[in-house]
Amino acid sequence: MYHIILLIVFAAYLLIMSLIAIGLYKKDKKMAGGGTEVRIKEKYLLGVAVMGGAAGAFIARLLFRHKTNKFYFTVTILLSLLLQAGTLVLMVINAVQ
């Protein structure tokens, strides 16, 4: 029973972090287009992705065409996405058994 609860909590956490990532990428893209000097630091954008928002960061990069030329963004987000998705899949398998 507790496996299902942990799965729900983890999935909700990933969703919330992904929504935060989308919001940050959208805000940073808007600030970049407006010529604003104060921008969201790259370490925060990547940090949100690594801490659970990789799916949102991946989607935001495609939607807003932001930071798509940065190789280290691509690698970090894809590795984080694989790790988070793999963890979620293992939790689903564990909850079903």
Image (spheres, rainbow, N blue to C red):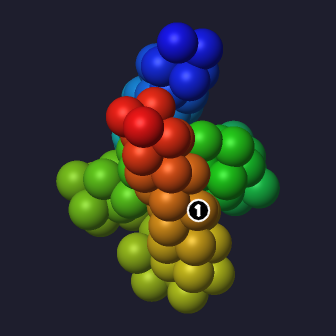
**Secondary structure at numbered mark 1:** helix
The residue under label 1 is 83
Which image quadrant for residue 80?
A: bottom right
Q: Is residue 42 above or below residue 2?
A: below
Tell me if 17 is positioned left or right of 46 in this view.
left
The image shows residue 94 at horizontal and vertical percentages of 50, 41
Picture layout, residue 37 above or below residue 18: below
- Please name the residue shown 42% across and 37% down the image: 97
Looking at the picture, which amino acid does disc 1 mark? Leu
Residue 25 lies, in percent from the top left, at 46, 45
Q: Looking at the picture, tell me which residue is in the foreground, 84 or 37.
A: 84
Q: Classify residue 60 as left or right of residue 88.
A: left
| Residue 74 sits above or below residue 38 on the image | below
Using residue 63 as the reference point, say whether residue 27 is left or right of it. right
Q: State the residue at coordinates (50%, 26%).
A: 7
Place of residue 3 in the rendered image (x, y in percent of width and height, measured from the top left): 56, 23
Residue 45 placement, left or right of 57: right
